[in-house]
Image (tube, rainbow, N blue to C red):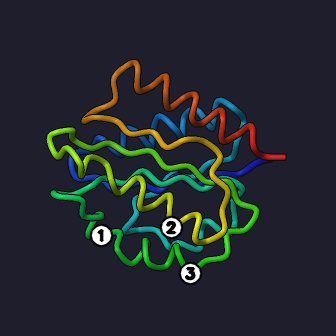
Amino acid sequence: MATAHVVYATITGNNEDVADIITEQFEDLGIDVTETEISQTDVTVFSDVDICVICPYTYDEGALPEEGMDFFEDLQELDLSGKIFGVAGSGDVFYEDDYNVAVDKFADAFKKAGANQGSNAVKINLEPDEKDIDALDHFTKELASKIN
């Protein structure tokens, strides 16, 4: 059975909602999935699964989640060769050029660790609506399809 781990960081609860949607979709696809909050998670959990997912928020003007800084740094030091990753996050378009940049930064960190991007990143403005849920379902199915 394929395995996945979904890690989220949230202030407003929106990214926990994003993580919940992804987790439920993985469950519906028959994938053994675990969901945890970033400050309660050791980055090495990604070494033990097939699919690695992060749902970060972007703080203020492009900052990564404070509680996820160690996780972000450690992620870049892992060897995740052969792992599939995806990043999806909620942000606020109010921040214009800084909108959801944490999603891109975490995707770059996964690439530095040697993981393969299994789906395009999903960026959601504020809380997920029906269109976003559809995009997250597609995202999750695409990640699952990359597992041999």
Identify the residue position indicated by label 3 in the image: 77
Sooner in the amino-acid sequence: mark 2 or mark 1: 1
Judging depth in this view, the residue of 90 and 107 nearest the camera is 107
Residue at 40% across, 26% down: 132
Query: Would you say the residues marked 2 and 3 are in contact, meaning their CB atoms lie under 8 Å apart?
Result: no
Amino acid type of the residue that numbered disc 3 sits on in the rendered structure: Glu
x%, y% of residue 145? 74, 37
Amino acid at dot 2: Ala
Q: Amino acid at mark 1?
A: Glu
Locate residue 14 relative to residue 112 in the image: left or right: left
**Labelled disc at residue 67:** 1
Q: Residue at x 28, y 64 (%)?
A: 65
Q: Is residue 2 above or below residue 67?
A: above
Q: Quadrant of residue 102?
A: bottom left
Disc 1 residue crowd, few under 14, some 14–19, many 20+, Cα 10 Å: some
Task: Kindly report the distance in space between the C-alpha atoms of the residues bearing marks 2 and 1.
Answer: 16 Å
Q: Residue 83 at what x, y percent from top left?
A: 70, 60
| Label 2 Cα crowd, 10 Å radius (few <14 / some 14-19 / many 20+) | some
Q: Residue furthest right?
A: 148
> Nearer the N terminus, badge 2 or badge 3?
3
Rendering coords of residue 90 (x, y %)? 32, 42
Residue at the top extreme of this rendering:
130
- Nearer the N terminus, badge 3 or badge 1? 1
Q: Which secondary structure, mark 1? A: helix
Quadrant housing residue 124: top left
Q: Nearer the viewer, mark 2 or mark 1?
A: 2
Query: Is the residue 47 above or below the residue 127 in the image?
Result: below
The residue where tag 2 is placed is 109
Under circle 2, the secondary element is: helix
Side (left or right) of 34 relative to 65: right
